[in-house]
Amino acid sequence: MAPAPLHPVVQSVTARIIARSRATREPYLARSRAAYGRKTQRAGLACANLAHALAAEPDAAKARLAGTERPNLAIVSAYNDMLSAHQPLGRYPAWIKQAAFAAGGSAQFAGGVPAMCDGITQGQAGMELSLFSRDVIAMSTAIALSHQMFDAAVCLGVCDKIVPGMLIGALAFGHLPVVFVPAGPMPSGVSNEEKSRVRQAHARGEADRDALLASEMGAYHAPGTCTFYGTANSNQMLMEIMGLHLPGASFVPPGTALREALTREAARHALGLAAGGGRFTPVAEVIDERALVNGIVGLLATGGSTNHTLHLVAVARAAGIAIDWDDFSDLSAVVPLLTRVYPNGAADVNQFQAAGGMALLIRSLRDAGLLHDEVTTVMGRGLAAYTRRPALREGAVVWEDGPCASTDLSVLRGADAPFSPDGGLKLLRGNLGRAVIKVSAVAPEHRVVEAPARIFDTQEALLQAFGRGELERDLVAVLRFQGPRANGMPELHQLTPALSVLQARGHRVALVTDGRMSGASGKVPAAIHVTPEACAGGPLARLRDGDVVRLDASTGTLAVLGDTDWPARAPAGFDPAASAQGIGRDLFGVARAQADGAEQGAGFFQWPQWAGR
């Protein structure tokens, strides 16, 4: 079935992105295209260079690589066995090498990238390295691909900063085809609602550490991605809807025959996209303005992670494309919310997959004219292939027609009967700056809060005030000096249980911060990523206890009310010493000093002229 005509707002937002980006996108494409067309990359290496790359290979692989006709696949992996989402990746390189060799090519493990877990570092000093790890991962990916041995790449990564970082690094090699390969979610355990209940009980002092730990270990209990719809699972949705996964790959569990078969198929498929064949598909042609708009639409339709208001901006810049929060906001007004997956519902991603998954989501959005169909993907032209889902038939992967209707309307719906007529992310503007808010999990009655501000400069100070009972009233909790230049912009998800307790007690509560919340941003309204950040001259530095702040998600307002002279106040001082040393933070001073603002992606790269500033 042909897709519906493109929605006029999707069309107009895309047109302005194309116009805004022309001066940077065209040089990026020219640079990438100048490297197209070689039969194999290693054909340009001198004999001594090539010998170094072959020295450790088995004889059969050595003989194949010594020739320069057959494509060679780079494996870039975020494997480690501490993180559940990445532990399954340990078996992938052997499968990929076997599949590539059997398909007539070869594959080498090109390099590893670091993989942090925000779940482990949440509320800890190490969280201040988390966002910057994205750019380190991008550089690590570039180092892995820099040997000019590779004709295509498979990127093995799952979680928060890893997938965006790998994609940014891969886009620096725009002439190479790239296929992303996920690990899949762990089995469902303790429900996300039950986990949240125990966390709040612990925050109230009604559950001890043993009860809390038992609940957490019941939720996070096996190899695979965490099952709530945070940044990790939003990553998988994005890679699929933007055409960098094999169709239906995102949420197939690890440890299954289909997961292994899809991984082997990804290797064969990536080889077939290399230059010299009939399906050459470099990543520079896949990630364009239309693909990025499709990604934003998917994010909004699923109530996805707020972190991608940073990551998608950074990915776009790596491809010479400029997107901003106005683009997210304007699309949010017309993209309906089609899923209810925790934190904006009780279900997890396994239930989303069972209800119809990505195939149905993409079909619904495509049929409603909300996705660009004239895109290039690793499967070819258009999104029709992504309305199909994989199955195993006699040991081989085949794609079958995906469902046309949801099997669970409490989890996944079509665009004709959405949970909400608009998307899950909104832009806030006012005299406190620009910010984003995720409202898909926030009840309508909590979306407007006007109350006196209580100002904090650290998470610990806020939690201590809660513990002393000082926050038992309507309030806007303002947590400042949490931006990228201050301390690396940590996630502040550990505040959620305490703020949720206050809201449950009947108080009108909101959070305003220049830091981040988790992809699991929940039921308390939170104006996050406030930019300019406080330590870079932003208005939050001028707020004082008792100032009345209005957060209105319905009108997109974030403002201090009353005193018209407040901008003339001297800003509060910021002491960087607390975040300058310890737990590796000493090494990231240059990152903090060079970091862009949140709306520019909060990265520390000094982009070349073609990428703009």
Image: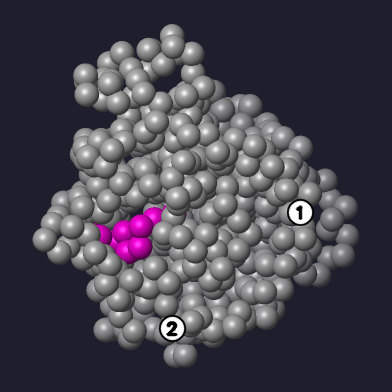
CA separation, marks 1 and 2?
33 Å
Local SS, label 2: loop
Local SS, label 1: helix
User: Measured along the vertical axis of the image, is residue 537 above or below residue 529?
Assistant: above
Q: Amino acid at mark 2?
A: Met
- Give the image location of residue 89, x and y in percent: 26, 41
Q: What segment is highlighted magenta in the picture?
A: 242-254
Label 1 neighbour load within 10 Å: few <14, some 14-19, many 20+:
some
- Give the image location of residue 224, x and y in percent: 25, 51
- Is residue 337 located in the magenta-colored stretch of the structure? no
Q: Amino acid at mark 1?
A: Arg
Which residue lies under the disc numbered 2? 1
- Is residue 250 located in the magenta-colored stretch of the structure? yes
Instruction: Name which residue lies at 45% across and 51% down.
Output: 279
The mark found on residue 22 in the picture is 1
Circle 1/circle 2 CB separation < 8 Å: no
User: Mark 2 or mark 1, which is nearer the start of the sequence?
Assistant: 2
Magenta segment main secondary structure = loop
- Give the image location of residue 221, x and y in percent: 19, 52
